[in-house]
Image: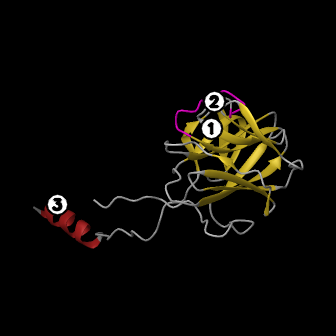
Amino acid sequence: MECLGCIRAFFAANQQIPEYSRLPPVHLDTHFMGENAVIVKNGYRLCGTGGSLANQPIAQNKAYFEVKLQQGGIWGVGIATREVDLNKLPLGTDYRSVVLRDDGCVVGGGQIRHRLPQPVQEGDVIGVAYDHVELQFALNGVDLQVATSGIKGEEVYPVVYVDGGAVMEAAFSSFYHAPPAGYQRILVEQSLL
């Protein structure tokens, strides 16, 4: 009977009301990454070989995230569905992803949609804005004017991939540059039980 009293006292003292206002952070997802990809720095830095999706889909109308090129090599950043093969690089070869690649091309569905007017270099920050119709890229806060159509009718996630020594670091909040007007960080959907 004494143990039952201790258990009741423990649970009475440790009852906590969940904080619905505190959202879990968005980060690169170790459950949806390539076999040889390595995620470090609390889920924000990708190295090795392969891709990674973010742990949250882009659910709101206008979402923004950034990726900083820490070290050059083979890389890509954009959006993808969960059906994308994160081991088969480069991405953009099918309708499961649309990405900006290290060669300066925006590629989706196996087709080059745009070529950047300038190369991306180490230390540069790539901004990605998506409104479920159009995918836009910025370089160091300047719109690259290479808007392209996104992936229609599918749930999409931010995607980053690396190979050849590239290192990319994602930022899903605390951005280097202000998002375009009307865009904001990726919001986390919550269900109330």
- Regarding mark 2 in the picture, which secondary structure is present there? loop
Residue ID at (58%, 52%) = 27
**Mark 3 falls on what kind of element?**
helix
Q: Is residue 82 magenta?
A: yes
Up/down of 6 relative to 43, above or below:
below
What label does residue 97 carry, if any? 1
Please indicate, yes or no, whether residue 137 appears anywhere in the rendered image: yes
Whether pointer 1 and pointer 2 mark residues with C-beta atoms closer than 8 Å, the reply is yes
**Dot 1 amino acid type:** Ser
Report the residue that reaches farthest toward the left.
Answer: 1
Q: Is residue 43 visible?
A: no
Q: Secondary structure at mark 1?
A: strand
Q: Amino acid at mark 2?
A: Asp
Instruction: Give, as a single range, the part of the protein colored magenta.
Output: 81-92
Residue 117 lies within the magenta run: no
Quarter of the image that includes the N terminus: bottom left
Badge 2 density bin: few <14, some 14–19, many ≥20, Cα 10 Å: some
From the image, tell me which residue sits under label 3: 3
Kind of residue indicated by mark 3: Cys
Residue linked to disc 2: 94
| Earlier residue among tags 3 and 1 | 3
